[in-house]
Image (cartoon, helix red, strand yellow):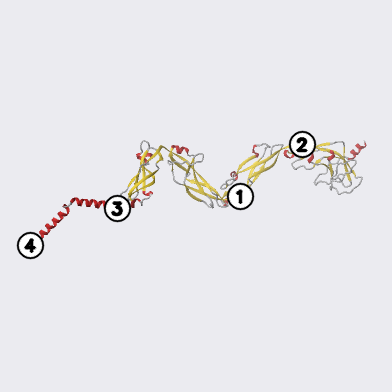
Amino acid sequence: MKSDKDSTSLKMIGSLREKIHKLFLNNTSVKICSVILAIFIWAIIINIDDPLKTRTFTVDVETINENALKSVNKVYEIIEGNVAVVKVRGRKSVVDKLESYDIRATADLSNLSSVNAVAIKPSLRKVVQSEITLECEQVLKVSLEDRASRQFKVNVVANGTPDDGYTLGECTARPNMIEVAGGESAISRISYINVFLNVNGASEDFSKRLVPVAYDEEGNEVKSSTLSFGTETIKVFAHILEEKAVNVKIKISGKPANGYQYVSTDCLPEKVFLAGTSKKLKGISEITIPIDISGMTSTSSKLEQNIYISDYLPEGVSAVEGSETVSVKITIEQIIKKNIDVNVSAIKFRSVGNGYEAEIIGNELFVSVLIEGRASVVNRIRSDNVSAYINCNGLDEGTYTLPVLLDNLEESCEIVDETKLKIKIKKSDDEVTNEPDSTERPLWSPTRTPAATTAPPNIEVPAQTDREEVEDEEEE
């Protein structure tokens, strides 16, 4: 029984082997073609569903291994190839998901050729599910020059206007000196470094970090990829101060040279604006500027001058921009003399007593009155713009020698050499009663009786001559 079962099993195994042998060894060419066809069909299906695709990306080129140039004290500036065009080929499902920032293009400066060029190599920044290829046919070209560096002072340039009643005080930069390195050609063009501070609407102290900018002597920004600053930002502290308007007072001392007279002082502006803390400004009501005019003449160089307000301010107080100086003009004029010719017939009498009349004795047609005063005033005085008169205030009947006085003289002028005329006062024939000092008495004439005159206030009574001697002279 047992042997029959073993025999049956062996027969089954042999039959199975025979079938397998026939499956793999019979019709071999047909089977190989089937496999190839299957692979081909699979490739077609894959390419229809997820085909290959090429996309072009524009990316910025990164430079690497820059220390290779620094080690030989060189700097570079890109003249061509700072932007690269990269072709990416791969499955559509992968390529379509890529963005420009997923592509990296690098130029290794340690591999610069003799013409200062290096190939740009693209790469992918992230891992993808299928294989892709990247191509870039561009090169990066640079110019090389020696590296240089210099220290520059940092200038703070304020823009804007603080809040009403406030002004910008001192602005300080930390650091206030900065080292700038780069190519020799760029460094040689730099004249100064500025940072720009916006103070618009500020009413209290504040600080900001600002980016430094290099300028040439003509105010043009110096731009170069080789430039690098010792610090990327500068910290600026701004002090905001209160503002106050005060008057400017000029205090004149001393006397001008002989023959000259001080006239006036003009100051512009008459009011200036000061900046400081409220405590400092509280004690300032005006600014007094002393000026000594001793020995000055009308041609002295210091008659016109610009004066710095800061020289007269206490510590902690400063002048607001635009109020730093005041312009002072001092007027000093020369004193001159001039003879004014007066027609005797035009001389009038004043303050003739009630019931009296006056007349001039003599044959003079003209008399000269010598006046003295400032040149600008004296030169305007002429015979036709002044009135001559004789003051008869308080005089009784008799003969007198009295000075000829002038009306319409400014305070700066005076008569320095009196011209006297002989006059006679007598009782009026018509005995007309008039209030004294009410009208002016014209010059006496044989056909006309003088009228009473009005005496000017505060005129001294002239000295009276010896009446008896005059009368004796007339009798002789």
Taking depth in this image into account, of 336 and 449 the one nearest to the observer is 449
**Viewer-closest of 353 and 323:** 323
Q: Residue at x 83, y 38 (%)?
A: 343
Secondary structure, mark 2, is: strand
Where is the N terminus found, in terms of image quarters? bottom left
Q: Earlier in the sequence, mark 2 or mark 3?
A: 3
Q: Are marks 4 and 3 in contact (CB under 8 Å)?
A: no
Residue count near mark 2 (Cα–Cα under 10 Å), binned few <14, some 14–19, many ≥20: some
Q: CA distance from mark 2 to mark 4?
A: 175 Å
- The numbered dot on residue 43 is none
Labels 4 and 1: the sequence-earlier one: 4
Give the labeled residue for mark 3: 46
Give the mark, 1 or 2, whose residue is nearer the N terminus: 1
Amino acid, disc 1: Ala
Which element is circle 1 on?
strand
Q: Which residue is mark 1?
A: 245
The mark that comes first in sequence, 2 or 4, is 4
Q: Quadrant of the C terminus?
A: top right
Q: Is residue 77 left or right of residue 265?
A: left
Query: How busy is the neighbourhood of tag 3: few (under 14 within 10 Å), some, or many (20 plus)?
Result: few
Q: Splitting the image into 4 quarters, where does residue 184 fall?
A: top left
Residue 4 - label: 4
Position of 368 relative to 3 (above/below):
above
Q: Residue 310, image x and y in percent?
A: 58, 44
Residue 316 lies left or right of residue 67; in this view the side is: right
- In this figure, which residue is indicated by the disc labeled 2? 338
Spatial separation of the CA atoms under disc 1 and disc 2: 47 Å
- Helix, strand or loop for disc 4: helix
Could you tell me residue 374's position as x and y percent?
73, 39
Q: Is residue 75 above or below residue 90?
A: above
Q: Is residue 254 visible?
A: no
**Nearer-N-terminus badge (1/3):** 3
